[in-house]
Amino acid sequence: MGLRIIKAGIADSIQDMGRYGYQQLGISPGGVMDRIAATIANTLVGNHLKEPVLEMHFPSATILFETSMMIALTGADFGAEINGKEVLINQPILVPALSELRFTKKKMGSKVYLSVEDGFETDKWLGSNSTSFQLHKGGIEGRYLVKNDVLYFKNKEDLEIDLLTHLPWRASMSEFYDNNRINFMPGVEYPLLEKISQNSMVTNDFKVSNQSNRMGYRLEGQALLLSIKKECLSSAVSFGTIQLLPNAQMIVLMADHQTTGGYPRIGQVATSSLPKLAQVSAGETIRFELITHEEAETLFIQQQQNLQQLQNACNFRLQEYFKNE
Amino acid sequence: MLQNTPYQIYAIGDQGITLDYGGEMNELLNKKIFQLYTLLKKWQPEAILDIIPAYHSISLIYDLIKVKKLAGTITAYQFLEMKLREIEAQLIGDITVLVNRTKEIPVCYDVSLAPDLDELAKMHQLSHEEIIEIHIQQTYRVYMIGFMPGFAYMGSVDDRIASPRKSNPRLQVPAGSVGIAGTQTGIYPFISPGGWQIIGQTPLVLFDANKENPTLLEPGDQVRFHKISLEEFHHLKNKMD
């Protein structure tokens, strides 16, 4: 009762909304990189929003559904095909038993999320199913998925799906990833940047380097200079903290960030922009845009309201659809 | 004493907030942080996801939607800033009442496990034995845990052996390595890249994910090192594995 990895992808893992409450022990919260895509994946199949999902990079795994299942794919578009037929992202899909899902081409974005109705049975550690690669805990044995791993479904019913079917509604995601603008707020050491560097930060594109991963995105571009050299004793950092490294380049801390750091914190990506940043691939560029703290709060609250509306609409559609079956 | 210490409150983006006394490594300030940590833990509503104490600062990571519900008409940040000021004002002057655990940590300073002992001896014009003596004389305070699971930042190292970080960090430092960086001393819980000067290794496991309390050390702990031979090191290490 589950799906089987018949060919491993480069970095596919089980993630949820993160492991909180343990950062004072140095344990990173981790969790999905793109929280909006993960939330919508769960929304489309009627799940609780904290249900663990499968996060995949390109090239992604090839997957065999050993039993039938309702699934959704969100985030990146990797040219998904089921049994050779193109399938769409952001739409619930009914998948018959013994179907094969593969990803053919990186078209847009860098992380695709797969959800299944009622979720996967995975390892929970300290309250979360997120995979901690450092501690080898959570998800599937705390590691990336390998060939022949089986992800068991919590849902044990036989769904009797004969035909591959897209349910006739979809979530519109374009508003979340419409451009390469990343909103940020000044960090506590931002005033220490030279004026000209403060200006460079918002007037130049910065390239996401290929030394970027789930821990952090290293950026390449105009060197940024501090007017005063400051050695900081370590203190807390978070998902989205922009630090200035000794080589005058920036790093944006991502989901698997260290809990504390000592490099100057020159900025912080607005939480509402993190999903967009998470979908940027190495080699692509971003442009920072300065916003106020109030604006950041408002944008995030609006985003959450939109997701809530989407969830209500999806639940209603799902109920209607299965009532009429 | 340290009542009415000035502090700064600033945001870590839209879902984090820090109260920071500023300055250097200072035991009294860190005790205030530890006391604040205790008070904040007691208060902690569901909306606060993490409370992270550091050397002279403490940070809250929060769920913006839930805090906003508590905040009403003001912003979530304004609400938490107010709350932090309120709780900070409750700190009592007398912190001698705080009881800390003392942990004994065996360390083998044999050169085979202490790749930087030679360099430090030259730097400070001391013998290996003198460096070891100075390192084990002190009782250290765990100021904070960070960088990686269970990595305890301890201080203060005697000025006679305080040493800058390596200019070329090592790509791999073995788990249990005891290092010095400035006046900080610490132990690497896992094999990792590292820039601290390595002067010994402990056979103890610093972080065990299978235990309910996974870290050997916690913020506020007192730590004493004692010297063991290479033979004892291997004996203890075998018992651990």
Image: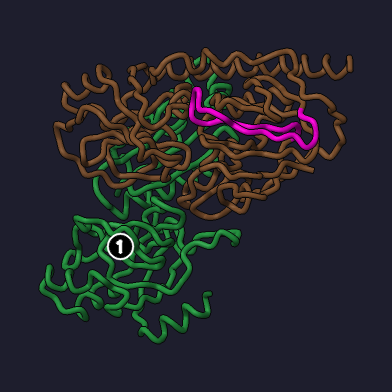
Chain colours: A brown, B green
- Asked if residue B151 is among those painted magenta in the image, a careful observer would answer no
Q: Chain of mark 1?
A: B
Which quadrant of the figure contains the N terminus of chain A? top right
What type of secondary structure mainly makes up the magenta span?
strand
Residue in view at x 63 percent, y 23 percent: A40
Residue A3 image offset from top left, x and y in percent: 72, 41
Q: Nearer the viewer, residue B129 or A303?
A: A303
From the viewer's perspective, tell me whether residue A6 is left or right of residue B23: right
Residue A245 image offset from top left, x and y in percent: 26, 39
Residue receiving disc 1: B185
Which quadrant of the figure contains the C terminus of chain A? top right
Q: Which residues are magenta?
A: A95-118
Residue in view at x 32 percent, y 75 percent: B113
Answer above or below: position of A124 versus A280.
below
Residue in view at x 31 percent, y 41 percent: B21
Residue in view at x 47 percent, y 77 percent: B237
Q: Is residue A295 visible?
A: yes
Residue A69 image offset from top left, x and y in percent: 77, 32
